[in-house]
Amino acid sequence: MTDATEQRPGSANAVAAGSAAHTDAAFSGAAVPSRAAAPPGAPDLAASRSGGVYRSGAAAPDTLPSVMRQALFHAPGDVQIVQVPVPTPGPGELLVRVEVALVCGTDVKTYRRGHPVLLAEAPAPFGHEYCGVVAAVGAGAEEFVVGDRVSSANSAPCGHCFFCRREQLSLCENIQPLLNGAYADYLLVPARIVEVNMFRVPHGMEPERAALLEPLACVLKGLEVGDVGPGTTVGVVGLGPIGLMMTYAAARRGARVIAVVRNDGKLAAARAVGAAEVVDLRTAGGDAAAVVRALTEQGKGVDVAVEAVGRPEVWDFAVAMVRRGGVVNFFGGCEQGSVANIDTYRLHYEELCLTAAFHHTPRHVRMAAEVLARVDFPHRTLVTHRYTLDELTSALRAAGRETEVKGFIKAAVIP
Ligand SMILES: [Zn+2]
Ligand SMILES: [Zn+2]
């Protein structure tokens, strides 16, 4: 949590004050309090929010409507907007009036083929990247008050399971309840998420920027794979919102980024967020990985290769562009049952490090809040199209490339 995000709405110029203070330390986590001070999963953000700075809030249920619109996932390809009762927040929970929900790649996969983990039972509400305003406060969640502008991650680790005790918080076995239901007029945020991974949005920050908190947290965690910094060349293949944020953050950490793209909109976006070189798959010829390698020192290959697509053939491409002794970060999750072929000769005799990064931890969510407050954070390059809640299906189709929308990177759904 940054000073900027601590600001109450209405306080003076929180964004500008925060931005001026932010340095590239935000990308390394150096500016973020260490988890070592608190047990895994402990609400160390909450500790910094205490001290009587904020007036205690009270729910204002009489101002709320009794029904609202909510998107329900019934089956792949079948999402319906229905009227449901506005929920009442239970202990520790918050009810948030959604200002904007962003379409995540996971939502697109869910729309296309369902999701065994995120949505167990259909029909299910979905959508998890959001910014909104607190509309009602459950008992015990009084660190937030009605009217606070907030954003949060979509889960929070339990702090005591096998993996949490080993500081592998992204693998927490008790990740439920997940946040789902941002494609709606109102969203109920589970208590543990409120306690651990919820942020007050700095005054003046656009909702679409604040709503990028969760995917940016995943990206910042992913960038800890390999030693990304000055003197490093990073190859990023797949320049969707995730690949673009990877490019931005790696470049701000001082790395030289080579982006691999296949359309004009993404080519321009990659340059806009800081790619030093852009390789266009349409003109690179048969061996595009060789074109990438040719752009590196002595043609050896990139130091760190990031796969941000989630398809086995692109995993192969990422391995093909890395140098001997380099690191491959398989960031894009493939469909269950996918198998990648690994050249064992290269893996062993060239000492490749093949690894992956998944999800986020509270530390990375805090880092994301810091990075969002930087003046140069390129949210307008990332969020390119807007849809109403009733147009959600169009947004999901555009994000899944079922319908071709020029210049599309990421969709915002505005209820
Ligand atoms: Zn997401
Ligand atoms: Zn856990």
Image: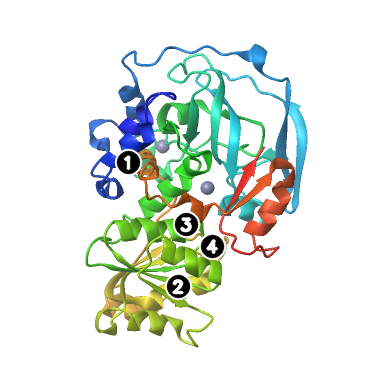
Whether the residues at callouts 1 and 3 have beta carbons within 8 Å, the answer is: no
> Which quadrant of the figure contains the C terminus?
top right
**Type of amino acid under label 3:** Ile
Pick whichever of labels 4 and 2 is earlier in the sequence. Answer: 2
Q: Are marks 4 and 2 in contact (CB under 8 Å)?
A: no
Which quarter of the picture shows residue 404?
A: bottom right
Mark nearer the viewer, 1 or 2: 1
Is there a contact, CB below 8 Å, between mark 4 and mark 1?
no
Q: Quadrant of residue 299?
A: bottom left
- Give the CA separation, mark 1 to mark 3: 22 Å
Amino acid type of disc 1? Answer: Ser
Amino acid type assigned to the residue bearing label 4 in the image: Cys
The reply to whether residue 206 is in sight is yes
Indicate the amino acid at tag 2.
Val
Query: Mark 1 or mark 3: which comes first in sequence?
Result: 1
Mark toward the start of the polypeptide (3 vs 4) = 3
Q: Which residue is mark 4?
A: 334
Q: Residue at x 27, y 45 (%)?
A: 29
Could you tell me residue 254's position as x and y percent?
A: 26, 60
| Nearer to the camera, 145 or 90 | 145
Quadrant of the image containing the N terminus: top left
Secondary structure of residue under mark 4:
loop
Badge 4: few (under 14), some or many (20 or more) residues near its Cα, within 10 Å?
some
Mark seen at residue 260: 2
Above or below: residue 224 compared with residue 211: below
Q: Relative to residue 230, is residue 5 depicted above or below?
A: above
Give the distance between the C-alpha atoms of the residues marked 1 and 2, in whole angstroms.
30 Å
Report how far apart the C-alphas of labels 3 and 2 lie in the structure.
Answer: 13 Å
Label 1 CB less than 8 angstroms from ligand 1: no
